[in-house]
Image: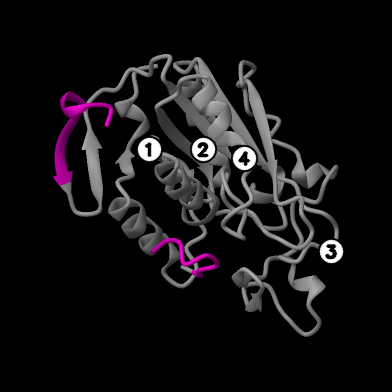
Amino acid sequence: MFNRRLVLTGLGATSVTALVPGAIMAASIKPDDASALLVIDVQNCFLPGGSLAVKDGEQVVPIINRIAKGFANVVMTQDWHTAGHVSFASTHSGKKPFETVDLAYGKQVLWPDHCVQGTEGAALSKDLAVPHAGLVIRKGFNKNVDSYSAFTEADGKTTTGLAAYLKARKVKRVFLAGLATDFCVAWSALDARKAGFETYVIEDACRGIDTQGSLAKAWTDMTKAGVKRIKSEDIVA
């Protein structure tokens, strides 16, 4: 996993049944008013045909639609980059996608141009059916700073306000789904733990990029941070 911030470094005892390598498996979980579903970056650029398509990314949509029905609190996020964003390889002369550069806040992976503000690629998937989502957080709109996490930009200090929003609604547990497991989902999960939330990643409701072992690294770091790894079937919608 590339490291920009030196990051990638329960419901209760009754809902945790066993500890297995790399995961904490949970029994059935019924979301309550203190639970929130975070749907991360299910956008056209990350879906088949997009400029940064995640393999099988479209498969998360029906799962998200199903489990979202069980949550009173749902937040969605969107990458929302400017043209010429610092994270785009095209912005750096002689650089190619997936190479890295050193920026003021650390290592930056360079990506193909993606999720440019107002474009069809930046739009949420038309197949998402979560009409009761209460908030859409747009991130990465600062031209000179990337933002994988739904909570904090890559400089490690500029927040999106999501933690305050959730705490104002007395949310204590967050469940993450979306794209991609080893980047925006993982960084969001780690920051959720830092903000004091019980944090669950719904494995089959996510898909990863998995470049240079990034997926395994992400799961290892999330597990170390206390993020719980569950399946959609563990959630009672």
**How far across and down, in percent of the image, does residue 201 sit?**
39, 40
Q: Tell me how far mark 4 sits from mark 1, CA to CA.
A: 19 Å
Q: Is residue 122 above or below residue 35?
A: below
Q: Tell me how far mark 2 sits from mark 1, CA to CA.
A: 19 Å
Amino acid type at mark 3 = Gly
Q: Which residue is mark 3?
A: 84
Residue extending furthest left?
18
Amino acid type at mark 1 = Thr
Q: Tell me how far mark 1 sits from mark 3, CA to CA.
A: 34 Å
**How far across and down, in percent of the image, does residue 230 sit?**
31, 37
Q: Which mark is residue 199?
A: 1
Residue occupying image coordinates x 17% and y 48%: 20
**Regarding mark 3 in the picture, which secondary structure is present there?**
loop
Q: Report if the CB atoms under discs 2 and 3 are less than 8 Å apart.
A: no
> 10 Å neighbourhood of mark 4: few (<14), some, or many (≥20)?
many
Q: Which residue is mark 2?
A: 60
- Magenta segment boundaries in residue numbering: 2-19
